[in-house]
Amino acid sequence: MCGIIGYSGSRNARTVVLDGLKTLEYRGYDSAGAAFSAEDITVFKTGGRVSDLEKITPNIVAHAGIGHTRWATHGAPSAKNAHPHLSFDGRFAVVHNGVITNCDELKLSLIRRGIRFVSDTDSEIIAHLLSLEYDGDMVSTIDKVSSLLRGATTFIALKKGDERVYMHRNGASLVVGKGDGECIVASDALAITPYTSDVAVLCDGETAIMNATDVKFFKNGKQLDKPFGKTDRTAPKDCSCHMRAEIDEIPSALLNAYAEISRSITPAVSDMVRNAKRTIFFGCGTAYHAGLYGKIIFERVGVPSNAVIASEIDDERFIDENCLCVFITQSGETADTLIALAECKARGARTLAITNVKESTVTFEADETVFIGAGAEIAVAATKSYVCQLLALYMLSQERTEKRMGKSEIQALANAAKVVSKENLYAPEYKDFNPFFIGKGIDNVTAKEGALKFKEITCKFADAYGAGELKHGSIALIDEKSVAYVVSTNEHDEERVRATVRELQSRGAYVFAVTNSNRLGANKTLMLPKIYDENLYPVLSVIPLQNLALTASLCLGLDPDKPRNLAKSVTVI
Ligand code: BG6
């Protein structure tokens, strides 16, 4: 996904666009650019970060501008491939979020019409088409150009000598804010709320034209009357490490999540859960691991369940009107998850979204939505949103029982999380060891999430292994250069995990344990505080693994907030 922004108003557009790009940089950060419209369109681009863009962007005075921070799909990260892209005649500048799936045929047809491409991107096509198809009316021009494009083709454009900002939404989010003498459009309301909390969300196929005082919406050439509403999405305070802050926020995030999730579990949501004959949990990355947790605890309350990586839905055959399909997505914008949602709806399933962003696409597509209220999560590696997803799944599973989590219980969980969030397993003497994350059952889910966190932000290999399965193959990897992080929170598996610890140690591994048992025989044991329901231990046991990954990343001199090759959520397939 990329971050795109547009501004028209009384402020200096340079300031608004650059500040907005810094807020949106979590969405992609391998190159950046901005364009400003006064008499002429001026464009500044870099193959680096927004901070590099700021250095090369002079203090020009302009009241209309657009900007882009990129997660590369077509064309390597470079100034040449950074957006905005100009049309052949310099009349239009465009920033795009998504992938144009028919770009090859379009590019060929444009080359045949004499257009010379200056970048390797698909997005440049939009700028050229706007100029070639321009008929004096931007609404009909945008409709014509959009009809030629396939794929995720959300874009924002400037026209030379025009202080209006033009935009079209298809496949990737666009939120418009209307302030006092200024309007701003961005991929995420986070970039808008420093100026106004009055926002409107564009839906697929919609076009908007904004100037300093007004925004007009159109669809299929007809003007729409689109309401503005209040958003509560606020950008977090600037800090040196968002991931550190977001792990430290887990106790307060859990309390906020409890209130938000409780509000979200309406009678309609409760009925959905209580009547489900089968539940299937879909997600990607960390959200998929939350789905694995959902499967286990829903089966513990008697609901046949499965967890599916969203991009693997094709082989999930038994989806029908008896299924409740649950889509877990922090951003609410992950393309693979949204595609799986559409497929499940087409097969007649009921659909429930669990997300952290109220204006996100998934909230418009699912039948019902549970908001996790974790607060904006900027670091690419999910931490507080993950534990709040687990809490949401736990509270939803209780709809199948007579139990409900009370205020004293969530407070106790938050207090326990506060204790655990101080714990860190990192030991410099093992920094060059191969890390193994090991658990059984529900603890294997935590091990998988711990391994993913480690890989995401240290860029070093790590993997998760079932405690019972390790000896059937992967144990071949264990030697005196191995360090194991064993998660064990249920008494039922203790004996087997203890045996695994011994198998590891007898082959030279150093074993850390994250557990509520002091009988595992690990070399170093991190005892978890006792809590009232063992189903909630995964909310706690993942936190030391998050701290481990963060510390390892920092000790490697990396930026944990912006890991190599990643984006906060990927809005392309
Ligand atoms: C990946 C992110 O791109 O998308 C992960 O790097 C994230 O951190 C995954 O878990 C799913 O994102 P979302 O927004 O659908 O939960």
Image: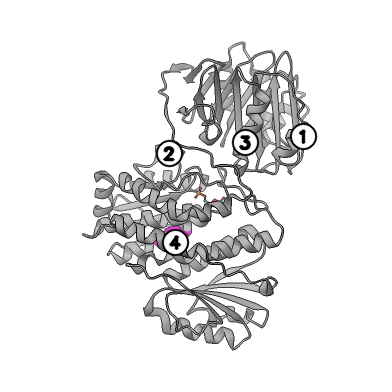
Residue 345 placement: quadrant = top left
2 or 3: mark nearer the eye: 2
Instruction: Tell me which label, 4 or 3, sits earlier in the chain.
Output: 3
Question: Which three-letter amino acid code belongs to the residue tagged 4?
Answer: Ala
Residue designated by label 1: 55
- In space, the residues marked 1 and 2 are separated at their CA atoms by 34 Å
Tag 4 secondary structure: helix
Residue 84, given in percent of the width and then of the height, sits at: 69, 30
Instruction: Tell me which label, 1 or 2, sits earlier in the chain.
Output: 1
Residue 485, given in percent of the width and then of the height, sits at: 55, 73
Q: Specify whether residue 268 is painted magenta.
A: no
Residues at discs 1 and 3 in contact (Cβ within 8 Å)? no
Specify whether residue 435 is in view.
yes
4 or 3: mark nearer the eye: 4
Question: Which three-letter amino acid code belongs to the residue tagged 1?
Answer: Lys
- In space, the residues marked 1 and 3 are separated at their CA atoms by 36 Å
**Residue bounds of the magenta highlight:** 289-293
Identify the image quadrant of the N terminus.
Answer: top right
Q: Nearer the viewer, residue 519 or 366?
A: 519
**For residue 66, above or below residue 51:** above
Instruction: Tell me which label, 4 or 2, sits earlier in the chain.
Output: 2
Tell me if mark 3 has few (under 14), some (14-19) or many (20+) residues whose alpha carbon lies within 10 angstroms of its own: few
- In space, the residues marked 2 and 3 are separated at their CA atoms by 31 Å
Tag 3 secondary structure: loop
Residue designated by label 2: 358
Instruction: Tell me which label, 2 or 3, sits earlier in the chain.
Output: 3
Tell me if mark 1 has few (under 14), some (14-19) or many (20+) residues whose alpha carbon lies within 10 angstroms of its own: few
Question: Which three-letter amino acid code belongs to the residue tagged 3?
Answer: Asn
